[in-house]
Amino acid sequence: LGNLDEAAVGVEGGHKNEIYQMMDGLADQGQAVIMISSDRPESLGMANRLVVMRDGAFVGEMSSPRDVTQADVLKVAVGS
């Protein structure tokens, strides 16, 4: 189980890709990878399941985030 909390914040583009490849490799090996990110495009691009939290509470889950827009995530996050 890997846990990455804002793993790519402040990381230059090429190095971000290395982090993403490492995460994909772990997932391909059957490992669970938990990525915590406030970057919606990053979350949508990397996740196969997206959990949305607000004020420390679970407010929604999206099982196909690659089919979800940033606006969809924002609606769940703000509760509208």
Image (cartoon, helix red, strand yellow):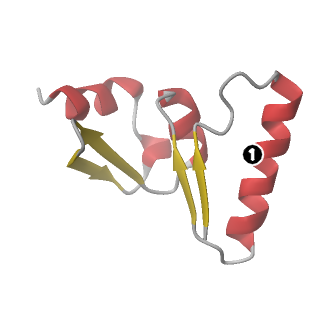
Q: Which residue is more in the foreground, 75 or 34?
A: 34
Query: Badge 1: how crowded within 10 Å, few (<14), some, or many (20+)?
Result: some
Q: Disc 1 marks which amino acid?
A: Tyr
- Occupied quadrant, residue 17: top right
Q: Residue at x 73, y 58 (%)?
A: 24
Relative to residue 6, is residue 64 drawn left or right?
left
Q: Is residue 28 above or below residue 65?
A: below
Q: Is residue 68 above or below residue 27?
A: above
Relative to residue 28, is residue 34 drawn left or right?
left
Q: Which quadrant of the rendered structure holds the N terminus?
A: bottom right
Q: Residue at x 32, y 33 (%)?
A: 73
Q: Is residue 32 above or below residue 61?
A: below
Q: Is residue 41 above or below residue 2?
A: above
Residue tagged 1 = 20
Please count the marks in the image: 1
- Residue 42, given in percent of the width and then of the height, sits at 58, 33
Q: Residue at x 69, y 33 (%)?
A: 8
- Residue 43, given in percent of the width and then of the height, sits at 52, 39
